[in-house]
Image (cartoon, helix red, strand yellow):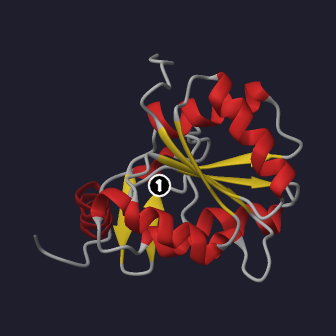
Amino acid sequence: MNTDFKYLKVLIVEDDEHIANMIKVILMAFSVEQVHVAASYQEAIDIIEDHPVDCAIVDYLMEPDKGTRFIEHVRWSSNPDRAQMPLILCTVYTDMKTIVEARDAGVSEILAKPVTPMSIFYKIIAAMEKPRPFISAPRYKGPDRRCRTLPWKGKPERRISHLAAATKVENFLRSQEKIDV
């Protein structure tokens, strides 16, 4: 795992100046030399238009727009590098409704407030070095929303291929002498 953040370019989108400065100081302690801070959705858009950014840490509840609006703007960008940029949503709201909204907007990781240096570190590592496959579909753009791979615990027949399913149907019908194959 490469933990050298020296050349990382990070955008912080946070309307609370104290929180933005705290995150900036933490990033600088990790040797991040290029940190941009935006206090609004529009300011963040202007920054990414003018400066290359590797990763963004975005506040969820900003005035007048939610951070998910910025995330959707980035994901639907015509610039493929920008659209696939790791986006970390920073929020105090970790209820299921907020998590689903963030996931559906295309967030890479969710950083729960209050933040710590280690939580920021681990979320950047997860977003930058262990990204999920990027999905570009008609109604969604962002990392694969499935972040866990769970073993199947149902009947094995539910996971058989279409060809195997067709063979089973054909064999059943033969046994019933309904068709001549």
Along the line of sight, which residue is nearer the eye, 37 or 78?
Answer: 37
Q: Is residue 93 above or below residue 140?
A: above
* x and y, in percent, of residue 109 in the image: 62, 47
* x and y, in percent, of residue 100 in the image: 70, 65
Along the line of sight, which residue is nearer the eye, 5 or 18?
Answer: 18
* x and y, in percent, of residue 118 in the image: 75, 25
The residue type indicated by label 1 comes to Pro
Q: Can see residue 125?
A: yes
Relative placement, left or right, of 61 versus 157 is right
Along the line of sight, which residue is nearer the eye, 169 or 18?
Answer: 18
Residue 153, picture quadrant: top right
Relative placement, left or right, of 170 versus 97 is left
Circle 1 residue: 143
> Of helix, strand and loop, which one carries label 1?
strand
Relative placement, left or right, of 158 versus 38 is left
Numbered label tally: 1
Q: Can see residue 130?
A: no
Q: Is residue 124 above or below residue 177?
A: above
Residue 168, picture quadrant: bottom left
Question: Mark 1: few, some, or many residues within 10 Å (few <14, many ≥20)?
Answer: many
* x and y, in percent, of residue 90 in the image: 74, 52
Residue at x 32% of width, y 70% of height: 176
Farthest left residue in view: 181
